[in-house]
Amino acid sequence: MTPSRKREKGLVRPYVVTDGRAHPTRNTFDLVTLVIAATDRPLSGLSPEELRMMRLCRPGALSVAEVAGHLALPVSVTKVLLGDLVDSGHIITRAPVPAAQLPDAQLLQEVLDGLRARL
C-alpha cells in the first residue's frame, strides 16, 4: 500500500486529535494509571476520540496502556485526551496497587495448595 493510499483510508494525524498539543495538562499519567469514567457527566461536547474513551471506560477501570491499545491511539495522544477528560470531570484516575502491597507469590501458592487439598 502506498503512502497516499494510507491517507485515503481516513488516517488522522495525532496533532489534529489533540489540537496541536503534545503534552497533557497534567503529568500524573503513566502506562499503568487506572482510568475510570464518571457516569454522572454529560457526553455532549466531547470529541469523537473522547467519546470512544468514555464508552470504553464506563464498564470498569482500564490502564492508560489498555485505553491506548483498544482505541489504536498513540500513548502520547491518549494521555493528552485523558488529561482533558480529567480536567472536565469525566474521568477519574487511580494509581495501581504497588507491588510491595501485593501478597507474596509463595503465600498465594500455599493458600492455593491448601484449598486444593480440601477438595
Image (spheres, grey):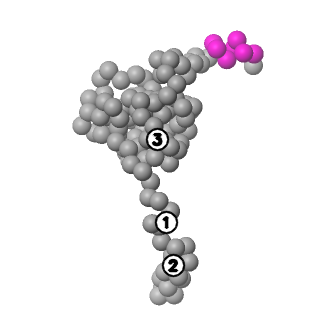
- Relative image position of residue 101 (x, y in whole percent): 45, 66
Q: Is residue 86 magenta?
A: no
> How far is mark 1 from mark 3, CA to CA?
20 Å
Q: Which residue is mark 3?
A: 29
Q: Quadrant of the N terminus?
A: top right
2 with respect to 83 (left or right) = right
In terms of secondary structure, where does tag 3 sit? loop
Q: Quadrant of residue 14?
A: top right
Task: Look at the image and tell me whether residue 65 can be seen.
Answer: yes
Question: How many marks do you count on the picture?
Answer: 3
> How far is mark 3 from mark 2, CA to CA?
32 Å
Question: Hey, what amino acid is under mark 3?
Answer: Phe
> How far is mark 1 from mark 2, CA to CA?
14 Å
Q: Nearer the viewer, mark 3 or mark 2?
A: 3
Task: Look at the image and tell me whether residue 52 can be seen.
Answer: no
Question: Hey, what amino acid is under mark 1?
Answer: Ala
Location of residue 42 with respect to 36 vertically, above or below: above
Location of residue 47 with respect to 105 vertically, above or below: above
Residue bounds of the magenta highlight: 2-8
In terms of secondary structure, where does tag 1 sit? helix
* Residue at figure coordinates x 69%, y 14% from the top left: 5
- Relative image position of residue 119 (x, y in whole percent): 48, 85
Question: Hey, what amino acid is under mark 2?
Answer: Leu
- Relative image position of residue 37 (x, y in whole percent): 34, 40
Q: Which residue is mark 1?
A: 100
Residue nearest the observer in this picture, 103 or 47: 103
Q: Which residue is mark 2?
A: 107
* Residue at figure coordinates x 41%, y 30% from the top left: 25
Q: Is residue 6 magenta?
A: yes
